[in-house]
Amino acid sequence: MKGYIELEKYAALEAQNKLLGEQVEYLKFQLDQLKRMVFGARSERYIPDSPDEQLSLFDTPPRPAIEKEKVKIPSHERNKSRPKKKPVRLVLPAHLKREEQVIEPDIDLTNMVRIGEERTEMLHYTPAELSVRVIIRPKYVAKAGSADKKKANSPIAIADLPSRFIDKCIADESLLRVILTDKYLDHLPLYRIAARFERMGMVIPHSTMCGWVGQSAGRMKVLYNKLIEVVLASAYLQVDETRMEVLPGKGNKSSRGKPKKRKTHRGYLWGYHAVYKKLIFFDYSPTRGADNPVEHLEHFKGCIQTDCYDVYDHIRKLYPDVKHYHCLGHSRREFEKALGNDAQRAGHAL
């Protein structure tokens, strides 16, 4: 009886030891991942160390290795996988304006005949400059005692001022176009754009430029709505949300409807990418909930590709016409993480 109890204790201890070992291995794995996130490289490249690592899980024969050209060097040998490309001279586009400069030889050409020429093209840059566009509208009035003056409803005749993108704005469309392009395509903050204008001799206050950007956005809302319509008419969309820190302002509230107290708060920028049309629109939302995709995908019919965030599963169930696909990059990432645990099977998947 005593021996039986000892065997039971031994079996229980062995099972406990096995469980603790598994927990230790799991904690080691978590620690390795944390160390990698903090200190390690984030590259997910996988290059097998030997052909043996490429063996299939189903005993399929390995792919034949590609023979590489060996270049002999006195001290060692190295593998050369591809020939070196020769540098190609940049071709200057034909649509660029050409300004020709003719340089004659510094000798007496009296008894000489021109037989040809050598042309050398160089890419030239003309710096941007600010100028003042002045609109002059002459005023006219009928002569004293004339019949026209008696019949006219207004004694003064003057042409109407041309319509402007922003009413009563000292910046015309060309300057607004540059500011919006620099900010939203080249990702320059407004204070850097203002500093560049200052170097050109014009000081534009930051608050003034912010006002121009805000009013321009309001005027272009019709184009933004048309962009949303065209993107959502696509049959294949990629959808993702990214978090962003948002400065405080009017209407910035938390998910509970209360005003934000911190200097900045976290918001989310939802992106909808029509892959084949190469178009994308972004829409800001204060939360990461399903409200934004539910609103935009209500009448969408086609395929969406997303990560594994469960909000998209809710969309698929809510709208049966939406086909849902996941990203292979996310599933591949898990195999890459498992390399240290099971190199053979994880390596095969990679």
Image (cartoon, grey):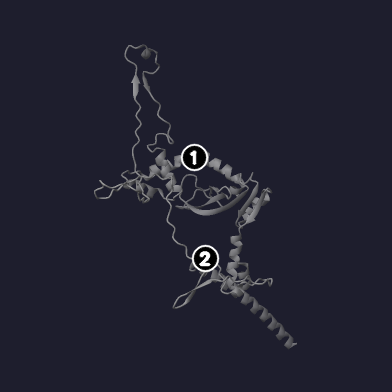
Q: Is residue 268 above or below residue 20?
A: above
- Label 2 with label 1: CB-CB less than 8 Å: no
Report whether residue 23 is seen: no
From the viewer's side, name the closer residue of 275 and 39. Answer: 275
- Name the residue rendered at 61%, 60% in the picture: 328
Please state which amino acid type lies under the numbered disc 2. Ser
Mark 1 falls on what kind of element?
loop
From the viewer's side, name the closer residue of 45 and 311. Answer: 45
Q: How many marks?
A: 2
* The furthest residue to the left: 108
* The furthest residue to the front: 111
Side of 165 relative to 23 (left or right): left
Q: Quadrant of the N terminus?
A: bottom right
Task: Please state the horizontal and vertical placement of residue 154, each as a whole percent of the image.
Answer: 38, 18
Q: Quadrant of the C terminus?
A: bottom right
The crowding category of the residue bearing disc 1, from other C-alpha atoms within 10 Å (few below 14, some 14 to 19, many at least 20), is few
Task: Please state the horizontal and vertical placement of residue 168, each as a whole percent of the image.
Answer: 39, 34
Q: CA distance from mark 2 to mark 1?
A: 40 Å
Please state which amino acid type lies under the numbered disc 1. Met
| Res. 143 image quadrant | top left
**Which residue has dot 2 on it?**
43
Q: Is residue 142 above or below residue 207?
A: above
Q: Nearer the viewer, mark 2 or mark 1?
A: 2
For residue 46, the mark is none
Earlier in the chain: of badge 2 and badge 1, it is: 2
Task: Please state the horizontal and vertical placement of residue 288, each as a whole percent of the image.
Answer: 56, 52
Report whether residue 130 is seen: yes
**Which residue has dot 1 on it?**
220
Mark 2 falls on what kind of element?
loop
Q: Is residue 64 above or below residue 290?
A: below
Task: Please state the horizontal and vertical placement of residue 68, each as a whole percent of the image.
Answer: 54, 71
